[in-house]
Image (cartoon, rainbow, N blue to C red):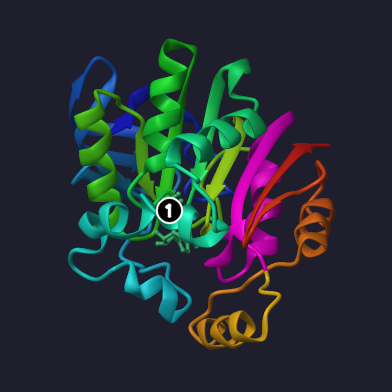
Amino acid sequence: MFRRDLLSIVHPNPASRVALDLAEGIEENGVISSGVAYDPATNKNYPIKNGYLDLLDGRSGADNIANLTNFLPGAGRGYEPLWRVRSLNLLTGEEFSNQRELALISDLAGLDRGGLYLDLGCSAGLYTRTLAAQLKDRGDVVGIDISPSMLKEAARRARKLGTTPSFARADAENLAFADASFDGAVCGGSLNEFGDPARVLRETRRVLRPGGRVAIMGISKAKTPRGRRLQSFLSTGGVCFFAPEEVFSLLDHAGLEPDPPQTYGAVFFAGATRR
Ligand SMILES: C[S@@+](CC[C@H](N)C(=O)[O-])C[C@H]1O[C@@H](n2cnc3c(N)ncnc32)[C@H](O)[C@@H]1O
């Protein structure tokens, strides 16, 4: 599903700065459930089906093994019940519910201002659908991911919750959105999995309006020898881990003014404002 009026900020070809049009589609209350979007600059068509707008034009978008595991059949269905509901309990070593995590993320993203938010690497859409439900008619959320399995599940879960955020299969390293089109961006765990996190943050800054906020939850560099060994193994698959000062520096270099980081066990929460 994709909100029709948001096609105006979708620029699959950043150089042309031309937005998508709807060529054909089934639409209800301004939300396209299936159809074809069309780029007048390149004559390319982009399908809207299985709950998302596919902007990757046949490309996988994956640049490491960790990314490819999210393409496995069942990855989307299993992700939240098998991992996400308890992930922060395990990583922080304390009682850390998804509700507590989402309250922190909403706060860091400045959600009470309303507006349009981007969820970078949304997986099964935990942040996308929850923030959309919180915003109600004060704003909306676009969730992007490269995994078809995750996006299909994200749309299913959002519909089940009674929300209609927009979903796109799109690359966070080359955001297919117009400059200054979002009021905030959120990123739950994905910074650890992006092939080029610095580039994602530069792109995020580009699509944020001045004063726009970024809220990130991620996994820190391990401090124990055992944790370091495990992380070194996971790094071979493309996952990276950050010390708090590295997150600060990545945000700063991307043109974002970082807040002091918050750390809970192996998890960091980082907020920043677009300069
Ligand atoms: C750790 S999971 C995200 C979890 C999710 N944000 C949550 O809070 O439940 C990382 C996700 O990033 C996606 N991903 C990896 N590289 C990407 C890229 N370049 N662009 C968009 N999504 C990407 C993966 O497909 C995967 O679903």
Residue found at the very far top of the displayed protein: 137
Quadrant in which residue 26 is drawn: top left
Give amino acid for label 1: Ala
Ligand 1 position by quadrant: bottom left
Q: Is residue 271 above or below residue 15?
A: above
Quadrant in which residue 56 is drawn: bottom left
Disc 1 under 8 Å from ligand 1? The reply is yes
Q: Is residue 241 above or below residue 212?
A: below
Q: Residue at x 51, y 36 (%)?
A: 100
Quadrant in which residue 205 is drawn: top right
Q: Quadrant of the C terminus?
A: top right
Is 267 part of what is drawn in magenta? Answer: no
Image location of residue 131, percent across then percent down: 45, 29
Image location of residue 34, percent across then percent down: 18, 36
Q: Which residues are magenta?
A: 191-220
**On the picture, is 166 further left or further right than 272?**
left
Is 195 part of what is drawn in magenta? Answer: yes
Image location of residue 140, percent across then percent down: 45, 24
Q: Residue at x 77, y 37 (%)?
A: 274
**On the picture, is 187 further left or further right than 162?**
right
Q: Nearer the viewer, residue 220 or 54?
A: 220
Q: Nearer the viewer, residue 14 or 126?
A: 126
Q: Quadrant of the N terminus?
A: top left
